[in-house]
Image: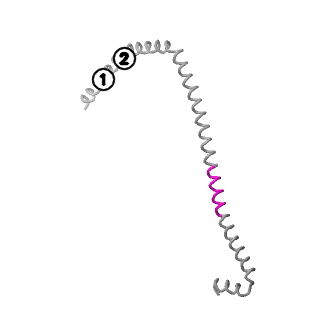
Amino acid sequence: MDFKDFINQIKELADPAVFAIIAKLAIAFYFLKLLYKGLKVFLIFIFKSKDEFNKYSQLQKDSEENKKRDEKTHKLIEEFKEKFEERISKLEMDLNAYKDVKHDKDKETVEARQTMKLVLEKLTLINK
């Protein structure tokens, strides 16, 4: 027996008023089922939206904190630069002078090494 036969038998056995009440209850139950599905989807959407909003507001908060920290760091760097600019320029001059003096000594050392290398090569050729 299929569903249509079952409905037809209920129509014949039941009073039309009772059948109408049963049909109305079935329709109401069906709409409640659809409403529940829709409400479930709507609640999932709301909670996802709320999570996304919380993530976005946390990112904004972090961004503001990072911006404040960067401003403080930049301010400290500027203060350091202003305070030690003369010292840095003096150190650069001293370092350049040191490099000039050291560079001449390095040339002498390199030339001595090259001379020793040539001497060793000639000695190895003679020994062969």
Name the quarter where the C terminus is drawn: top left
Nearer to me, 96 or 75: 75
- Circle 2 packing at 10 Å, graded few (<14), some (14-19), many (20+), is few
Given the image, on which type of amino acid does mark 2 rest?
Answer: His
Q: Is residue 12 left or right of residue 121?
A: right
State the image quarter where residue 116 is shown: top left
State the image quarter where residue 22 is shown: bottom right
- Circle 1 packing at 10 Å, graded few (<14), some (14-19), many (20+), is few
State the image quarter where residue 93 is shown: top left
Residue 61 position (above or below residue 110): below
- Residue 85: percent from left, percent from top: 49, 15
Residue at the spot of label 1: 114
- Residue 105: percent from left, percent from top: 36, 15
- Residue 73: percent from left, percent from top: 56, 26
Given the image, on which type of amino acid does mark 1 rest?
Answer: Gln
**Label annotation for residue 103:** 2
**Label annotation for residue 19:** none
Q: Earlier in the sequence, mark 2 or mark 1?
A: 2
- Judged by its main secondary structure, the magenta piece is helix
Q: Residue at x 62, y 46 (%)?
A: 53
Q: Residue at x 69, y 87 (%)?
A: 9
What secondary structure is found at the residue carrying circle 2?
Answer: helix
Q: Residue at x 67, y 83 (%)?
A: 7
What secondary structure is found at the residue carrying circle 1?
Answer: helix
Name the quarter where the N terminus is drawn: bottom right
* Mark 2 and mark 1: Cα distance apart in space: 16 Å
Q: Which residues are magenta?
A: 37-49
Residue 13 position (above or below residue 37): below
